[in-house]
Image (cartoon, helix red, strand yellow):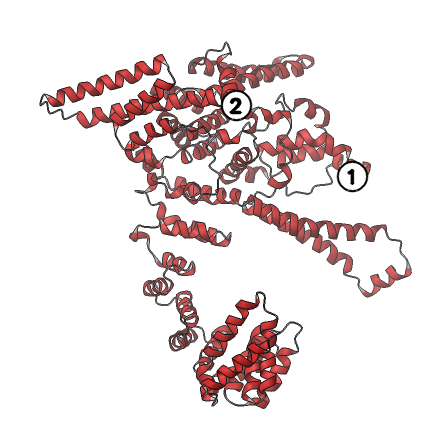
Amino acid sequence: MFRDDTLNNVLGALEGKDLMCAIKDMENYLAAHPHQINSDRLFAIKTDYQMMIDYWRKGYKDPELPQLYHKLLHRMYVLYANVMTNARVLQSPLMASLFMKAHLSPRDWSVQVVREQLEKFVSDIALLELEPQHTVKERRKAMHQQHTQLMTELFAHILTADLWTDGQGESIEQLLLSPTVDSADQQLIVSAITLASMNCYDMVKFRTLIHVYQQSTDEYVRQRALFGWVFSLDNELEEFLFPEMRTLVEQTVQNPNCMKELIELQEQFFYCLSADEDRNTIEKEIMPELLKNQQKMQHRDEQEQDEENILNDILHPDAEEQEFEKLENTFHRMIDMQKQGSDVYFGGFSQMKRYPFFNEISNWFTPFFTDHPGVAHTWDKYGNVKFLSSILEFGPFCNSDKYSFLLAFETVLNGIPENVRQMLDRGEAVMYQKLGTEEMSTPAYIRRIYLQDMFRFFRLNPLRNEFKNVFEKDSFQSMFITRTAFDNTDIQAHFKEVVAFLIKRNQKNYAKDLLANWFEEKYHDYDYYMLKGYLGDNVEDSYRKALELNPQSERALLGLARIWFKHMDYEKALDAYNQLLEMNADKKSYQLNKAICLTNLCRFEEAEQILFRLNFEDADNLHVVRVLAWALTGDGKYEQAGRLYDQLLAQENPEDSDSINYGFYLWFTGKIDDAANCFRSYVTNAKPKDERWATLHSIIYKESDLLEMKGVTDREIQMMIDWVDVYNA
């Protein structure tokens, strides 16, 4: 994206409300890049400011002075923005080509003329129904060709034009709300406004987008406008130059539906950011399993019914059904990801954006329609294939991917076996989840599809760097609900939903960043402190406060029990587990953890009472066996403990803790060399060895109280460590 240090200095001065500094920096820029009109505008601003200073010097006390100064700042920002836009056009081949496309066109770009052309297109298409059938097809093609050219040039014009005047904004707003203009055209115009506004903030464009979001009855237009105004928000300019931005946002979010959509948009945005991780899951876990099961099924079908297969069918009559079930479950795993919001098709379609169709920037944002001149020829050829028409009508794909699929279909079709092609033609082969019309018309679905269109542009378009990329993985930019424009709203009351969502998506860093922005104390409720404790922020204090707000909360008390146990404060942990058992006496994990606390406090007999009962109820529970063996070891009941260690160490992959505990058992029973070998084996298998060695030291010293109880002196402890160390392999 284009940057210029001098122009950046102008913007910095404006954000600091330093008009004279901004004027001087702009003078420096225009001295190096002469432009008569811009120089005249700058001179007018400077002259008006000098007049203000002269009146002030003469002792005039003008009550309107703050407002006048703000207007001069605003005029200076408009000049800066227009200069920046022009500089970007001059420096960027892409922007220059878009500028030339719009300005070399003989069209009149006044809003009234554009609106008349858009409305005429709608009426002309409607009148086609009255024409003879043999002329309709060619007339329709010609009309769409001309109209697509108009929209392409209009898109380019919006991207490269100066900031809008208030009058332009009001006229565009009416155009976007008009029922006589085609929805697809309105959607494309909103996308152009969005890209332009994200690149260079324009208060009039922002106002237009937010008004369209508030007033439009077309959900497709509304959801694009929502994305547009949200990602046009600018913290610095809102605070210092455009307070109207915050006022408009505060008015808008008073609608509960708007707040709901903002939170949904934030979560859907993170689904897009996770597209690479989801692609890895599909490529490394789901697709190999799908292919493996599919091949097994195919191989089974191709096998002759020999004696071995007949015998297998008799012995394992459910095998084929189980294979079908496996295949279906694997497929549904991907479908479930897609339903939850994951961009599961990004990986596959990312390789299909190299067609000339995508060289035109507006095509990345054009709603899918088969009359588009870029795909109409392919549709004429293959539109009767039911599989294709079904995918394009009911498939859960964004507009960009539908264009990709249609363009690639001929290549795909040529590589498909004839029998499969016949199935496709009949609509029998479907490897995606069909969506109903009702689901596809929901705001959440429409918004998700548009997000995916935007995401593909910013990830795959070779010229994406010419635009401000809102999909960069940056916590400040990605977490738009923390923008200052929302500060005086109730949005923080909904932060817990997003934090919980991020935790489920394994995005804990983003969750912590959002938690740090949860600064309003009036929203610090029980959930806030629970999430704070879960994310490791001042854990003990957080769980305590949560428990104060909800004294009957098992989760808060359990959080405290775990943190006390982790800090080896076993008395407090034991007290917490006793309270938890009063709340839920049958909870086996509470009983087991209580027993562990008791063993760590060397209260072995009390622990054994609990552990023997748990072991009787579930003899195969190795967690119980492990703790019981240690309790018996501490209590000196070595014969019973030895039998349990035999059970634990007979497992295919014994736990490290079992080997260590067995080493202590051997030590206490006088088998010093065997104990040393056990400890030595633990260190030998270490990866990395140094870390395991340090851990062994800490483990042995951690049990110093028990060792002392068993009569093992400090000198003997050191001798054991030295003996393991010297002869360690």
Query: Which quarter of the rendering shows the C terminus?
Result: bottom right
In this rendering, would 324 be left or right of 582? right
Q: Can residue 606 be seen in this view?
A: no
Mark 2 is surrounded, within 10 Å at the Cα level, by few (under 14), some (14 to 19) or many (20 or more) other residues, namely: some
Front in this rendered view, residue 222 or 578: 578
Identify the residue position indicated by label 2 in the image. 94
Q: Is residue 218 above or below residue 506?
A: above
Q: What residue type is labelled 1?
A: Val
Q: Position of residue 28 (x, y in %)?
A: 33, 22
Mark 1 is surrounded, within 10 Å at the Cα level, by few (under 14), some (14 to 19) or many (20 or more) other residues, namely: few
Task: Kindly indicate the quadrant of the structure image that contains residue 668.
Answer: bottom right
Identify the residue position indicated by label 1 in the image. 420
Q: Which amino acid does label 2 sit on?
A: Leu
Front in this rendered view, residue 659 or 410: 659
Front in this rendered view, residue 116 or 15: 15
Cβ atoms at labels 1 and 2 below 8 Å apart? no
Local SS, label 1: helix
Q: Can residue 98 be seen in this view?
A: yes
Q: Position of residue 80 (x, y in %)?
A: 35, 23
Q: Where is residue 707 in the image (x, y as percent from the top left)?
A: 47, 85
Q: Which residue is drawn at 21% across and 21% down?
A: 49
Q: Is residue 395 above or below residue 539?
A: above
In this rendering, would 535 be left or right of 247? right
Task: Kindly indicate the quadrant of the structure image that contains residue 372.
Answer: top right
First reached walking from the N terminus: tag 1 or tag 2: 2
Q: Residue at x 54, y 70 (%)?
A: 692
Q: How far apart are marks 1 and 2 (CA)?
A: 43 Å
The extreme top residue here reads 106
